[in-house]
Image (cartoon, rainbow, N blue to C red):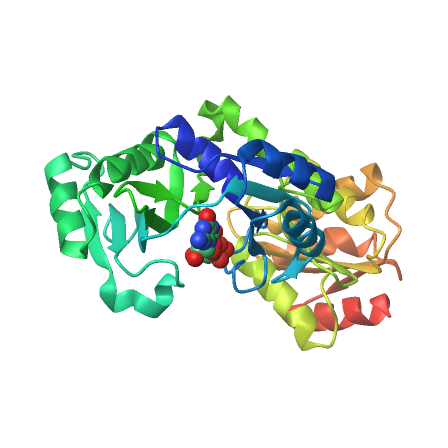
């Protein structure tokens, strides 16, 4: 789960990382009231889950309430990399003496944590990769203050950054994050360091021990289809086409979306029902797809592995008995016991339920039916 900047900063503040005073605003009036309460000058910042907001016009300094009104009005509703801005963060503006970069993430290949520091922050970090001081951290041993001090010196950051980075490491580990990033981490004219931006990705697998994360989910999923799918425990991403896609395994689901494109169609979604597709999971998936008014046909693409073809077929048949489907369905069933599975589907076939032996034939049929 990705956090908005303001949520990341709220999390940072709980761990004692210095951030600017600010307020959330969903309207121009709230932005003006907020600016008065935090004190001018302020920065008006778009809250979207993508970086590069500054370049896209989503971060503006305002030294008067009139400027707050103008910027808030311009930024609300702005599209940044396909994300519409519905919320602002208005914070007291900082004077910047220097901009740095700091992050902790997982290096899966090294089976260690990876800290990255650079004295050239503020810009996209990919542009200054040669300036990054990397620090691998044994997750069992943790980060010692001595190692942190050395790392900070190597990167050319002031020693004041050490306590902040120790706290950021704590957010990363105790907070069960996959990524914590501050870009820019700034040096104030006073010599203190301060987090001016916050990017946090929490590890969804740790959700069970963080009931407090519920507060973060407010604006995250605005697509009602995604909300419904998430409530049913499905891996679903809404897209804007008209061919509903159900597949088992993320790789196959992506390949299914690709092949729909390849034969001239547009997928309405990505949906991975995972391994061991039970009848109930299939019914849940069909229900989510069925509730999407833009879906004109449904493409079920299952490759039997541990789950045998006849179980998948029985699951589909049972699911069809549970959900009243409005769009025609095309099924491609392959893998373990595919022949037995197709045999079960055969007696249910009609012009509303078509079985095809290959992915490309099934994709063509599904796209044709969506026209
Ligand atoms: P991003 O573009 O999405 O990464 O958004 P940031 O929060 O990093 O802001 C972009 C840039 O705006 C920063 O790198 C700063 O240069 C500038 N900026 C943000 N807040 C302030 C502030 O309080 N004072 C000043 N002077 N500049 C700011
Ligand atoms: Mn930034």
Residue 245: percent from the left, percent from the top?
Answer: 70, 57
Report x, y in % for residue 353: 83, 57
Measuring from the top left, give residue 163's x and y in whole percent. 23, 35
- In the picture, the quarter occupied by the C terminus is bottom right
Q: Is residue 347 left or right of residue 135?
A: right
Residue located 10% across and 38% down the image: 146
Number of residue marks:
0
**Direction from residue 274 to residue 132 in the image, left or right:** left
Which quadrant holds residue 147?
top left
Of residues 319 and 156, the one nearer the viewer is: 156
Q: Classify residue 144 as left or right of residue 198.
A: left
Q: Is residue 342 above or below residue 13?
A: below
Residue that extends furthest to the bottom in the rendered view of this protein: 263
Say whether residue 3 is visible: no
Residue at 66 percent of width and 76 percent of height: 262
Q: Give the answer, above or below, for where 196 lies relative to 266.
A: above
Q: Residue at x 40, y 63 (%)?
A: 124
* Nearer-the-camera pick, 194 or 275: 194
The residue lying toward the viewer, choosing from 172 and 371, is 172
- Frontmost residue, 176 versus 215: 215
Task: Give residue 140's quadrant in the image.
Answer: top left
The residue located at (41%, 30%) in the rendering is 13
Residue 205 appears in view: yes
Q: Position of residue 255 (x, y in %)?
A: 58, 65
Q: Is residue 204 left or right of residue 344?
A: left
In the picture shown, does residue 259 fall above or below 309? below
């Amino acid at each position: 789960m990705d956090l908005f900047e303001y949520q990341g900063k709220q999390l940072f503040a709980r761990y004692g990382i210095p951030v600017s005073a600010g307020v959330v605003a969903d309207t121009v009036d709230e932005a003006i009231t907020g600016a008065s309460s935090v004190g001018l000058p302020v920065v008006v910042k778009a809250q979207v889950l993508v970086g590069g907001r500054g370049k896209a016009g989503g971060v503006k300094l305002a030294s008067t309430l009139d400027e707050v009104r103008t910027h808030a009005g311009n930024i609300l509703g702005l599209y940044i990399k396909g994300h519409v801005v519905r919320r602002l963060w208005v914070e007291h503006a900082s004077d910047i003496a220097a901009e740095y970069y700091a992050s902790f993430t997982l290096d899966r290949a090294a089976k260690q944590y990876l800290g990255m520091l650079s004295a050239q922050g503020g810009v996209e970090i990919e542009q200054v990769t040669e300036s990054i001081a990397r620090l691998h951290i044994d997750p069992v041993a943790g980060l010692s203050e001595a190692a942190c001090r050395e790392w900070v010196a190597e990167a050319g950051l002031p020693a004041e950054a050490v306590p902040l980075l120790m706290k950021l490491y704590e957010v990363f580990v105790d907070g069960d994050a996959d990524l914590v990033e501050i870009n820019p981490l700034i040096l104030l004219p006073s010599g203190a360091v301060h987090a001016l931006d916050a990017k946090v990705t929490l590890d969804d697998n740790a959700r069970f021990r963080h009931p407090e994360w519920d507060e973060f989910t407010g604006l995250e999923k605005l697509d009602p289809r995604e909300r419904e799918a998430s409530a049913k425990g499905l891996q679903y991403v809404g897209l804007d086409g008209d061919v509903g896609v159900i597949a088992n395994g993320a790789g196959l689901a992506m390949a299914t979306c690709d092949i729909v494109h390849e034969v001239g169609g547009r997928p309405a979604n990505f949906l991975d029902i995972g391994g061991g597709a039970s009848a109930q999971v299939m019914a849940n998936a069909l229900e989510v797809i069925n509730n999407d008014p833009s879906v004109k046909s449904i493409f079920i693409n299952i490759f039997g592995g541990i789950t045998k073809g006849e179980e998948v077929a029985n699951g589909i048949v049972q699911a069809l008995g549970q959900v009243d489907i409005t769009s025609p369905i095309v099924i491609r069933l392959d893998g373990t016991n595919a022949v037995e599975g197709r045999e079960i589907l055969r007696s249910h076939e009609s012009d509303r339920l078509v079985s095809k032996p290959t992915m490309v034939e099934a994709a063509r049929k599904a796209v044709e039916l969506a026209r």
